[in-house]
């Protein structure tokens, strides 16, 4: 029997953030109920007893925006139609403005045991710049409330490369987050995506330049590590024992099944996706998928994904061997971009900053 992660996409948001290009639609109770029914229909369709579900991830959109009983119905359907491991990691993404103590307690009582809180920053001016609707105080209270109802595994998202941000601001957010019982931090560099409100010359010109963003990134890695958040992936940091089991599946080429509009899967030896169309998802008896890769997790893709991880890439691994890259690595070691211990190579934080070029040079 193989372990399987389940990703459930909940595409509703209260307000579109100006930097975000994820698929999302406005909240409507009627639509949410129909969407929940459609997710459950798909769980029944895909249900099997050949896999053991060891992780479930509710992502979005804003999953915490929809009524807790919709999430509970989805989890019930999962439990009925799949074999679920004894202690699965069950994560829900939470936007601070969409929860209170009661809703967090409901999530906890239905078996959710990990929160991913969209904090982004604890500097008030940065939250305004990012168009977020919550305050720093609300974000802190959300974490505190979550702990009070029983959560012990809490991840917070933060963002660097924001207009007007400086290294002191990043230090402040890290300091404040580390005073909370947070176990995991995901930190992303703001990227301007094409179809977003941030894609204007004024916004683009107001962003920190690339050199300063590199300084911010290296500072962040070191500041987080000083607080006990050890880097395990380009953008992810965890206290000991709190790496995301679900997200590790993406980087380790393990199986995951996505349900919902715009979800992605690596399942049944194929990568496939669902188009970002909520009406069609609700109407179709089974989600309409299109295959994006007939032969996923080949040698190159495996190496590319593994090099995102601090664990790195084994030169002679169980799945693939890469002796051909050894002659290429000495100059990268000398430049401080990679670590090599005779068995594995991994990127340093400096290497992560130019990871695309390094991977291109080593693998392609
Ligand atoms: S960043 Fe999150 S809350 Fe904002 S629009 Fe995107 S998915 Fe919704």
Image (tube, rainbow, N blue to C red):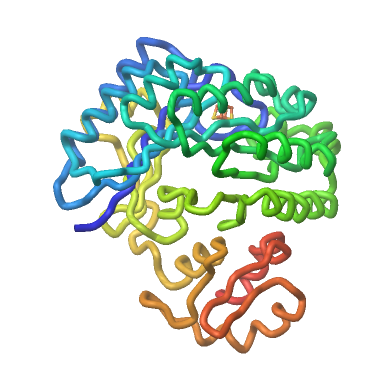
Tell me what residue is drawn at x 21 percent, y 51 percent: 51
Is residue 11 depicted above or below 54 in this figure? above
Image quadrant in which you'd find residue 35: top left
Q: Quadrant of ligand 1?
A: top right
Tell me what residue is drawn at x 51 percent, y 82 percent: 343
Residue 219 percent coordinates (x, y): 78, 52
Camera-side residue of 313 and 190 = 313
Q: Is residue 85 visible?
A: yes
Residue 69 percent coordinates (x, y): 32, 17
Image quadrant in which you'd find residue 357: bottom right
For the N terminus, the image quarter is bottom left
Tell me what residue is drawn at x 33 percent, y 27 percent: 280
For the C terminus, the image quarter is bottom right
Residue 131 percent coordinates (x, y): 69, 23
Camera-side residue of 207 and 135 = 135
Q: Is residue 277 left or right of residue 96?
A: left
Is residue 133 depicted above or below 3 in this figure? above
Residue 123 percent coordinates (x, y): 76, 29
Camera-side residue of 54 and 204 = 54
């Amino acid at each position: 029997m193989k372990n399987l992660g389940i990703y459930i996409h909940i595409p509703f948001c209260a307000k579109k953030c100006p930097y975000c290009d994820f698929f999302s639609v406005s909240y409507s109770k009627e639509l949410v109920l129909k969407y929940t029914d459609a997710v459950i229909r798909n769980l029944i369709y895909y249900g099997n007893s050949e896999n053991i579900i060891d992780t479930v991830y509710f992502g979005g959109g804003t999953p915490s925006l929809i009524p807790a009983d919709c999430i509970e119905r989805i989890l019930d359907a999962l439990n009925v139609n799949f074999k679920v491991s004894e202690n699965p990691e069950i994560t829900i993404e939470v936007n601070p403005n969409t929860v209170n103590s009661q809703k967090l307690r409901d999530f906890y009582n239905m078996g959710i045991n990990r929160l991913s809180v969209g904090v982004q920053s604890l500097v008030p001016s940065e939250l305004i710049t990012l168009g977020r609707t919550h305050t720093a105080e609300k974000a802190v209270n959300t974490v505190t409330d979550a702990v009070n109802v029983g959560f012990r595994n809490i991840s917070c998202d933060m963002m660097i490369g924001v207009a007007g941000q400086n290294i002191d601001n990043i230090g402040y957010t890290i300091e404040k987050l580390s005073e909370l019982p947070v176990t995991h931090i995901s930190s992303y560099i703001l990227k301007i995506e094409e179809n977003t409100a941030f894609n204007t010359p004024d916004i683009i010109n107001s962003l920190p330049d690339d050199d300063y963003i590199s300084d911010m990134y290296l500072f962040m890695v070191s500041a987080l590590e000083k607080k006990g958040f050890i880097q395990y992936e380009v953008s992810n940091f965890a206290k000991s024992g709190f790496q995301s089991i679900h997200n590790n599946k993406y980087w380790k080429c393990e199986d995951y099944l996505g349900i919902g509009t715009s979800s992605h899967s690596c399942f049944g030896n194929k990568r496939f996706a669902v188009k970002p169309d909520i009406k069609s998802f609700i109407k179709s008896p089974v989600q309409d998928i299109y295959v994006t890769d007939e032969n996923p997790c080949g040698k190159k893709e495996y190496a590319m994904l593994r090099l995102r991880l601090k664990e790195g890439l084994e030169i002679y691994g169980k799945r693939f061997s890469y002796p051909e890259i050894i002659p290429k690595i000495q100059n990268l070691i000398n430049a401080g971009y990679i670590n090599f211990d005779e068995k594995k190579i991994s990127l340093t934080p400096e290497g992560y900053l130019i990871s695309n070029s390094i991977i291109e040079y080593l693998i392609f």
